C-alpha cells in the first residue's frame, strides 16, 4: 500500500510538467510562424494565367444594315398607239438586247398612210423644182417659189409623221435585260399605254439603304460595300456607293444611299433584302488585345498587365473599335506588353503569376467568347465582373 501510493504521487507531477512543456512548445511554434509571415517568409504560389502580347494590326470601323436590291434599269414595255397585237416574238423570261422586237401591232392602215404621204411629198418636190426653174429664168414670181417651198416642207413633215406612227407598230426593247412574261396575247386589241411585258436589267443592281446622320461625315461616293442575302447564303457581291441623297428623312434622321452592285451570274434578284456592310474608317497600325483580356469594374475598363518580374498590375484602358475576336486599345497600353487573357478571377494588384502565352491578339483564351462589334463599329466596354 505504501509503495503504490508513492508511485501515484510521483507520476502526477511528471504529467503536469509534460503538459506545461507541450503548451510552451505550441506557443513558441505559433509565435514563430506569425513572425515569419510578418517578415514575408511565407508566400503563396504564383497563379497560373494565360497571356497575350499587345500588338499592332489592322482595325476597321464597319457599318452594317439592311437594304433592298433593285434592278439597275426596269420598265414596263407598253404600246404607244392603239392597235391589234399581231405577234409577240420575244423570249419570255430570257435575255434580250437593245432593239429586240417585243411586239408587232397591225400596221396595214398606217403603212398605207405612210405610202400616201410619201407620194404627196414626191408631188410637192416635183412642183417645187418646176417653179424654181421658172423663177430662175425670170418668168415667174418669187412668191410662187415661196409657196412651192412651203408646200414641200409640209409634205415632208407629213411623211415623217406617217413614218413615226408606222414605227410605233413595232415595240422594241429600250435596253438589254431580262424580259418578263407577256401580259397580252396575239390578237388582243390594246390601247396606248397598255403594258405588254416588263424588262429589267439585273446584271448590275441598285442597292438602297439608310445611314444615320451621325455617320454621314464618314461616307463618300465611291466607297466600297459588301452585300449578302439569305436567299444566296455564302455569296458576296461587291459594289460602290453611287448616290448620297442631300436631304435627310425628318422622321428617322437618316439619309438614303444608293450603291451600284455587279451581279455576276444573276444570282441576286430585284426585290430581295440584303445585308449591307461598308468600311467607314480603317487603321493599319492600331494597338489590339484579345477581347477576353478586357474586364469592367465600376464602369471602367481594365486589363491586367504582367510585369517582367511576373507580377500583375491592373491598368485602365480606353477602347476603340471591336473586331470579332479583338479590341482596339486607344490609351493605357504599349506595344509588346503582356496582358492576362484568362484567370482574372483570382488576381489582384501585385499578385504573382505564372504566365502561359495564349498567342497573338485575336486568339482568345479557351472557354471565353470573343466580343463582337456594334452595327456602327463603335467601341463598347467588354463584359466582365468586378474584381
Image (cartoon, helix red, strand yellow):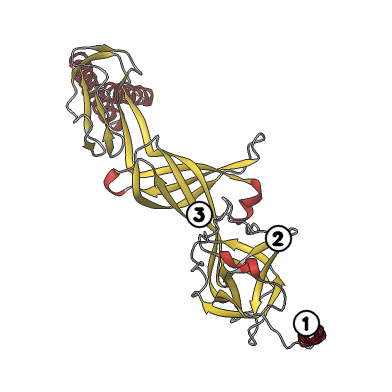
Name the quadrant containing residue 287: bottom right
Residue at the far front in the pictured view: 1
Disc nearer the start of the sequence (2/3): 3
Distance CA(mark 2)–CA(mark 3): 35 Å
Residue 1, disc:
1
Indicate the position of residue 294 as horizontal and vertical percent values.
63, 65
Q: Earlier in the sequence, mark 1 or mark 2?
A: 1
Q: Residues within 10 Å of mark 2 (few under 14, many from 20)?
A: few
Tag shown at residue 278: 3
Q: Secondary structure at mark 2?
A: loop
Q: Nearer the viewer, residue 113 or 305?
A: 305
Q: Which residue is mark 2?
A: 386
Disc 1, SS: loop
* 32 and 342: which is toward the camera: 32
Residue 317, above or below 187: below
Q: Which residue: 37% across, 34% down?
A: 74
Could you tell me if residue 147 is visible in this image?
A: yes
How far apart are labels 1 and 2 at the CA level?
A: 76 Å
Q: Position of residue 92 (x, y in %)?
A: 21, 29
Q: Residue at x 29, y 32 (%)?
A: 136
Answer with mark 1 or mark 3, whichever residue precedes in sequence: 1
Distance, label 1 to label 3, CA atoms, is 109 Å
> Up-down: is 266 above or below 335?
above
Residue 14 marker: none
Viewed as shown, does residue 302 lie left or right of 123?
right
Amino acid at each position: 500500500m505504501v509503495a503504490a501510493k508513492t508511485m501515484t504521487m510521483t507520476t502526477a507531477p511528471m504529467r503536469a510538467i509534460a503538459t506545461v512543456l507541450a503548451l510552451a512548445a505550441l506557443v513558441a511554434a505559433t509565435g514563430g510562424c506569425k513572425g515569419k509571415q510578418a517578415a514575408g517568409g511565407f508566400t503563396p504560389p504564383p497563379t497560373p494565367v494565360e497571356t497575350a502580347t499587345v500588338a499592332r494590326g489592322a482595325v476597321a470601323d464597319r457599318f452594317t444594315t439592311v437594304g433592298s436590291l433593285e434592278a439597275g434599269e426596269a420598265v414596263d414595255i407598253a404600246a404607244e398607239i392603239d392597235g391589234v397585237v399581231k405577234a409577240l416574238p420575244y423570249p419570255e423570261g430570257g435575255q434580250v438586247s437593245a432593239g429586240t422586237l417585243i411586239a408587232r401591232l397591225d400596221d396595214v392602215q398606217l403603212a398605207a398612210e405612210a405610202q400616201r404621204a410619201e407620194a404627196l411629198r414626191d408631188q410637192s418636190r416635183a412642183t417645187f423644182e418646176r417653179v424654181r426653174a421658172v423663177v430662175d429664168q425670170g418668168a415667174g414670181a418669187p412668191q410662187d417659189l415661196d409657196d412651192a417651198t412651203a408646200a414641200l416642207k409640209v409634205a415632208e413633215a407629213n411623211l415623217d409623221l406617217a413614218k413615226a406612227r408606222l414605227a410605233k407598230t413595232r415595240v422594241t426593247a429600250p435596253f438589254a435585260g431580262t424580259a418578263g412574261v407577256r401580259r397580252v396575247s396575239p390578237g388582243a386589241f390594246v390601247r396606248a399605254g397598255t403594258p405588254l411585258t416588263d424588262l429589267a436589267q439585273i446584271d448590275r443592281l441598285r442597292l438602297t439603304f439608310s445611314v444615320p446622320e451621325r455617320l454621314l461625315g464618314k461616307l463618300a461616293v465611291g466607297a466600297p460595300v459588301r452585300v449578302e442575302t439569305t436567299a444566296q447564303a455564302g455569296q458576296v457581291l461587291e459594289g460602290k456607293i453611287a448616290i448620297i441623297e442631300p436631304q435627310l428623312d425628318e422622321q428617322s434622321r437618316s439619309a438614303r444611299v444608293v450603291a451600284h452592285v455587279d451581279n455576276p451570274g444573276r444570282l441576286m434578284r430585284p426585290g430581295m433584302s440584303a445585308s449591307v456592310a461598308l468600311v467607314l474608317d480603317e487603321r493599319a497600325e492600331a494597338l489590339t488585345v484579345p477581347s477576353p483580356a478586357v474586364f469592367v469594374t465600376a464602369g471602367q475598363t481594365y486589363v491586367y498587365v504582367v510585369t517582367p518580374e511576373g507580377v500583375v498590375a491592373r491598368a485602365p484602358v480606353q477602347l476603340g473599335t471591336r473586331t470579332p475576336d479583338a479590341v482596339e486599345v486607344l490609351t493605357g497600353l504599349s506595344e509588346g506588353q503582356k496582358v492576362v487573357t484568362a484567370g482574372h478571377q483570382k488576381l489582384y494588384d501585385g499578385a504573382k503569376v505564372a504566365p502561359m502565352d495564349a498567342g497573338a491578339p485575336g486568339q482568345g483564351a479557351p472557354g471565353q467568347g470573343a466580343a463582337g462589334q456594334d452595327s456602327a463599329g463603335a467601341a463598347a466596354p467588354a463584359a466582365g465582373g468586378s474584381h
